[in-house]
Amino acid sequence: MKKNLTFIAVVVNLFVFSIVLKAEIKLPAIFGNNMVLQQQTNAAIWGKASPKRTVKVTCSWNKKSYSTKSDKDGNWKLKVKTPVAGGPYKIIISDGKAITLNDILIGEVWVCSGQSNMQMTMSGYHNQPVLGSNKAIFSSTNESIRLFTVKRNKSLEPLDDFSGDWKHCIPENVADFSAAAYYFGRMIQESLGVPVGLINASWGGTRIEPWISEAGIKEFDWVNLPDKNQQDDFSPQTPTVLFNAMIKPMVGFAMRGGLWYQGESNRNEPGHYEKLMPGLIENWRTLWGIGDFSFYYCQIAPFDYGTGGVNSAFLREAQLKASTSVDGVGMASLMDIGEKTCIHPADKETTGERLAYLALAKTYGKKGFEYSGPVLKKMSVEGSIVKLTFDHAKNGLTTFSKELVNFRIAGENKRFYPAEAVITREGITLTSPHVEKPVSVRYAFDNFVIGELFNTEGFPASSFRTDDWEIK
C-alpha cells in the first residue's frame, strides 16, 4: 500500500512538473524584442499562460514586479508604469517559466494606417518612385526609431493576433517600411530627441469601412454588415474585416496617437465619408480605452480620375470638414504635391513632415512655427467684389510667384466663372466681369489641380467652396 502511494505521489509530481515545464508565456506579436513602449503611462501588456496561474512581469527600468492571474482559458492582462523616454530595457514575464523581452525602448508610439499611400514603402512601387528615397534610406540608421509592419490579413471575426515583428531602423528595414510613416517618425525623433515606435497597418486600395469595428460600423445605417457564415472568399473591402485582422490584435497597446492616409477609394461618397472619418476615430478611441488620443490624417492629393464618378474635390471637402468635427484631430493638405497621372505622389517626405508639424504643435505643444495651410475664415461681398480672409495666415499669403488661376465665383444662377484674384494685405479680392452679384466662391475645386495658394510659411490651402449646392 505504501509503495502504491509513493508511486502515485511520484506520478503526480512528475505530471505537475511537466506542466510547469510546458508553462510558457505566449505574447501577441505586438510585444517583442526591440519594441517601443509609450513613455510615462500605464502600459497594458497581455498574453496567454497556463490557466489560473500567477503571471509576474518584472521591468528593468524600475526593478518593479507586477502580478495578475490568468483566467480559465489562460488569458491575462496587466499594466506596467513606464518612465520617461529611455532604454534599452528588459521585461521578464513568468508563470513558472520565464521569457525575457530584450532591447526595449521607452518613447513615443504612433499607429499608422490607411490605403496605398500609407502602405507605399520607401522603395516605392514599380515605376513609381519616392522622391529622394535612396539617400534617405542610405542615411536612415537610427537606434532610436523602431519599425513594425502588420502583415496584410482579413477576417470576418475579431482576431487575437497578427503577423509582424519589431525591427531596427537600418537601411534594409527602412526600404520596406511606409514612407509617409517613416518621414513622420524621423522628424518626431529628431525634434523631441526620444525613441519613436512606428506601427504600420495598411492595405492598398481599401475603403474606410473595413477599418472600423462591428460596433462602430453599426452607427452607419447605410453600411451592411458582412455575413459571417459565408463560405467563399471575401473582399478586403468588406466592412470590419481589416479592423478584425490588423487593428483589433493591438487595441489597447499604449500609444500617443494615430496617423491616417486614405480616401481615394471612397471618393464617390463624400457625404458618407464626412461621417465615417470621425466615426473611425471615435471607434478606435473608445476601444483603445486610453483617452482621446491624437489623430492626424492626410487629405487626398489631387489626381486626374477621368470623367467618371464624383469630382474628388468633394471628398477633399469632406476630409476638411471632418478635421473640425472631433477634438484632437488635424489634417495635412497636399494640394501642391499631387500628380496628374499617378495616384501615389512621389513627395512622401513633405507628406510625413506635414503630419509631424501637426503632432509637434497640437500633441507636443511646440510653438513658434506654423502647422497648417490657410483656412477660409470669412467671405464678404461688396457689390461685384468678393473679399476673403483666412486663419493660419498671420504673415499673409503668397503664390511663390505663380498666378492665382484656380478661383471661381458664381451668382445665384450657380454658374461658375474664372475669377481675377489678387492677394491683398487683408486676404484675397475676387472679381469677374461675368458675375455682377457673387454669392459663392470655389478654390481649386477639380479632380486634378496644382494648388498655388499658400501662407508664407509654405503650407498650401485646401480646396474649398462657400456654397452647399448639390453635388453633381
Image (cartoon, rainbow, N blue to C red):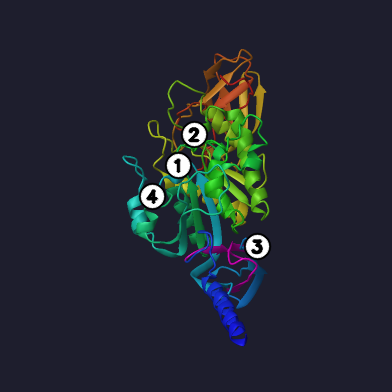
Label 2–label 1 contact, CB within 8 A = yes
The residue under the point 55% across, 31% down is: 315
Write down the residue under mark 1.
Answer: 117
Which image quarter: residue 403? Answer: top left
The answer to whether residue 41 of the structure is visible from this angle is no
> For residue 185, which numbered disc appears in the image?
none
Disc 4 versus disc 2: distance between alpha carbons? 20 Å
The image position of residue 453, as x and y in percent, is 51, 35
Within 10 Å of the Cα at label 3, are there few (<14), some (14-19), or many (20+) other Cα atoms? few
* Residue 206, percent from left and from top: 49, 37
Earlier sequence position, callout 3 versus callout 2 = 3
Which residue is farthest front? 1
Question: Disc 1 marks which amino acid?
Answer: Asn
82 or 151: which is nearer to us? 151
Q: CB under 8 Å between callouts 4 and 2? A: no
Q: Residue at x 40, y 48 (%)?
A: 121
